[in-house]
Amino acid sequence: MIEFKQVSYNHPDGTNALDNINLKIKKNSITAIVGNNGAGKTTLVKHINGLLKPSKGEVMIENNSTKKSSVAELSRNVGMVFQNVNHQLFADTVKNEILFGLKNFGFDQEYIDERYELMTNLFDLGKYEGISPLKLSGGEKKKVCLASVLAWNPEILILDEPTVGQDELQKNILFEFINTLHSNNKTIIIISHDIEFLWRLQPNIITMSDGKIVEIDYSEKIFTNKELIDKVGLIPPQIIKIFNGLGIEKDIPINLEDACKRIQGLMEE
Amino acid sequence: MYFIANGFIYRKSNSIIHKLDPRVKLLISIQLFTLALLVSNLYNLAIIFAAISIFSLLGKITKRLLRTMVFATGFSALILIINYFAGYSFIYSIQIALRFIAIVCSTSLFFLVTSPDELEYVLRWFKLPRDLVFAFVTSVRFVPVILMDTLQIIDAQKSRGLELERGNPIIRIKKFIPILVPLIINEVIRSGELAEAMESRGYGISKNPTSLYSLQLINQDLIVIFITSISFISIIFFGY
């Protein structure tokens, strides 16, 4: 369980980035944080692995305050993949990039070898083992970043804008991957502006604006709330727009196949 | 790092000093810099620090200038120790250390109250080559961007268990490799993209591109030039 208790955060220049946040994120859940630019989404998640410490209030991870632990200690259980892959990749080879975290946390060689093999198989990165990660395409770089974080098997995974710069194929792989992690009892937190992707994923949604939480609810409830969507500067998913256009406000299908069947049914009626 | 860097980054303000012609701001900075290099006693150094304090108060930059001082104090302490152990008197070592702080503050004073645009106008006024001016001003303009990149890279690597604060000095230096490599690569990529974007918007076609703004001294600039120049000459000839 991740718990924010009356958390406020001021940037060093004095601007208020988070304002009295109260939030609980359940274990083994998929949660997405949405909101316009500058809403405080990244600031919020940086509190989970201790990169930022609250100016007021407390962030608890499994009943332990983040104030008492270093970033390295918290990162052992909280993996974070940043938006810009070029901010993370530095090693001379893909292998060394994936091993970076494992070595930092001081795992024994046997475990390192085992995790490395698992990651290269999972992400199909074995063929790039000796290549510089900087020479890979955007999608492959993202995979290396994910593999380098998942390598040490953190319980909580934070993905900051994971679909930015990814083509549809990569998004599909990411979609499957998130579901696999979820079925392996991981807690996943996603920051994203990609509403279509989130609609498919159907996570719990936290909407933010001006450093405050506006609403927390299921995807359908959030994305069908026009007033809320406008307030946090989002555009509803295409499927919702189509069905709203057809006069249907509830039980909107999640994927295209179901939507087609539903429309076919309507036409037959 | 954010704390220190803020001591060198320009922020818009409506103060008297910000409104001065950039050439006047440069003149003040050069005068203070020169005095800091030339003066040789604590009394004159006190005058320089008083002048820096007055300008920072008028420019509403005292807090950020103090950050510059914090940054400079670390190095000046080293200068003091080296001088003292090299056989110079303690008072002389303190003078040298304070001169260093004064030099850094006089430079920081200019950058804190002068926007990159103003800096460009001043350099062009000196008839420096356009490419050189552009390269210099762009590097100044990108300081906050590079700073933000650095902070994000540090966050990204810390999230993968990198502990910059642990280990002996050699290990700590080695730990900066995961920070420096992505930073350098990012900036090389960014400079390449910037060059392409500039070229595709016609940079370099005309040797004398139109300038929308020209520098003009107004009464308050002339008054400041008069007062500071008289003070500068007085200290040079009678002060030390």
Image (cartoon, helix red, strand yellow):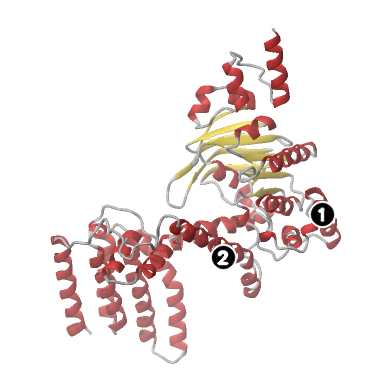
Near mark 2 (Cα within 10 A), the count class, few <14, some 14-19 or many ≥20, is few
Q: Chain of mark 1?
A: A
Q: Amino acid at mark 1?
A: Arg
Residue A135: horizontal and vertical position, in percent?
Answer: 67, 60
Picture layout, residue B9 above or below residue A234: below
**Quadrant housing residue A92:** bottom right
Numbered disc 2: secondary structure: helix
Q: Amino acid at mark 2?
A: Ile
Q: Chain of mark 2?
A: B
**Quadrant housing residue A248:** top right
Residue B81: horizontal and vertical position, in percent?
Answer: 46, 83
**Viewer-proximal residue among A198 and A262:** A262
Residue B214: horizontal and vertical position, in percent?
Answer: 23, 60
Residue B154: horizontal and vertical position, in percent?
Answer: 59, 59
Kindly identify which residue carries mark 1. A115
Picture layout, residue B218 above or below residue B225: above
Kindly identify which residue carries mark 2. B184
Disc number placed over residue A9 in the picture, else none: none
Q: How many marks?
A: 2
**Viewer-proximal residue among A93 and A111:** A93
Q: Residue furthest top?
A: A269
